[in-house]
């Protein structure tokens, strides 16, 4: 059917090589978002209330949560990068100089997304269920598994609205030089920076309003 028209990478490109940036994106997505579960945990056991009465601002606590989640997600991404040679991707120093800050920004935005939902969901089970419901479509629509160049119009619109799309496209542009990116690297990086800024702003505001 028509769905098979965009199911794979470009001709001549090993699928393992094509999918590797998508796996990297999936890693930082899941690690970043689920790091925010600590907020739900802290609220359930009353520790969050104790933190909020400490002589520090709520935004600094929220920023600390974001940075800790970002660090965890980034380190997990680095471990995935160590596997790159096994799928035919030979990382150069110049690639790493661009890739590591980008991965940090993607982790930053995904952690912010998790915190936005963690401030509104009251149970661990609810958080895990809702985030799985959100993250799987995000991963699927990001182009991590297949090219979106021939996707139906409705899917293309959803993919452009997916925050992960630009991170995956940028990482693939850096690592897989034989494949033209969907957007320019500049466009991807600007989008990732803007998304990160929006996510952290919403996360800090949402965190402050829960108390």
Image (tube, helix red, strand yellow):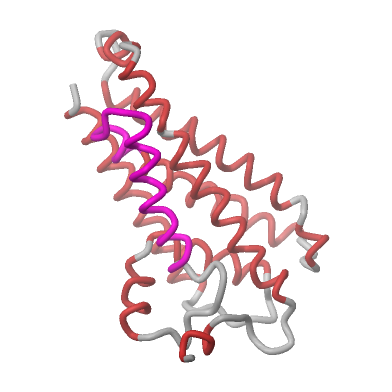
User: Looking at the picture, how far across and down is residue 184, in whole percent?
Assistant: 49, 76
Residue drawn at point x = 31 percent, y = 80 percent: 154
Q: In which quarter of the view is residue 52 placed?
A: top left
Residue 81 vertical position relative to residue 44 in the rendered view, above or below: below
Residue drawn at point x = 27 percent, y = 42 percent: 201
Picture quarter with the C terminus: top left
Residue 84 placement, left or right of 25: right
Residue 132 vertical position relative to residue 162 in the rendered view, above or below: above
Residue 111 placement, left or right of 198: right
Q: Main secondary structure of the magenta part?
A: helix
- The stretch of residues the image draws in magenta is 115-141
Residue drawn at point x = 78 percent, y = 65 percent: 87
User: Looking at the picture, how far across and down is residue 145, in whole percent?
Assistant: 57, 70
Residue 176 placement, left or right of 63: right
Magenta run includes residue 150: no
User: Looking at the picture, how far across and down is residue 43, in whole percent?
Assistant: 31, 19
Nearer the observer, 202 or 139? 139
User: Looking at the picture, how far across and down is residue 168, in whole percent?
Assistant: 53, 64
Residue drawn at point x = 63 percent, y = 47 percent: 77
Residue 170 vertical position relative to residue 99 in the rendered view, above or below: below
Residue 61 vertical position relative to residue 90 in the rendered view, above or below: above
């Amino acid at each position: 059917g028509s769905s098979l028209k965009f199911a794979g990478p470009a001709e001549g490109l090993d699928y393992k090589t094509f999918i590797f940036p998508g796996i990297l994106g999936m890693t930082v997505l899941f690690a970043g978002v689920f790091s925010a579960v600590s907020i739900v945990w802290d609220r359930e056991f009353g520790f969050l209330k104790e933190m909020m009465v400490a002589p520090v601002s709520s935004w600094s606590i929220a920023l600390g949560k974001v940075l800790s989640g970002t660090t965890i997600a980034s380190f997990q991404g680095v471990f995935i990068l160590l596997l790159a040679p096994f799928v035919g991707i030979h990382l150069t120093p110049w690639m790493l100089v661009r890739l590591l800050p980008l991965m940090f920004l993607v982790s930053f935005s995904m952690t912010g997304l998790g915190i936005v939902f963690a401030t509104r969901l009251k149970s661990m089970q609810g958080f895990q269920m809702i985030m799985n419901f959100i993250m799987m479509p995000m991963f699927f629509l990001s182009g991590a598994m297949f090219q979106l160049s021939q996707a139906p119009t409705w899917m293309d619109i959803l993919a452009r609205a997916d925050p992960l799309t630009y991170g995956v496209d940028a990482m693939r542009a850096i690592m897989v030089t034989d494949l033209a990116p969907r957007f320019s690297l500049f466009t991807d990086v600007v989008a990732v920076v803007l998304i990160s800024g929006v996510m952290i702003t919403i996360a800090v505001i949402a965190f402050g309003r829960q108390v």
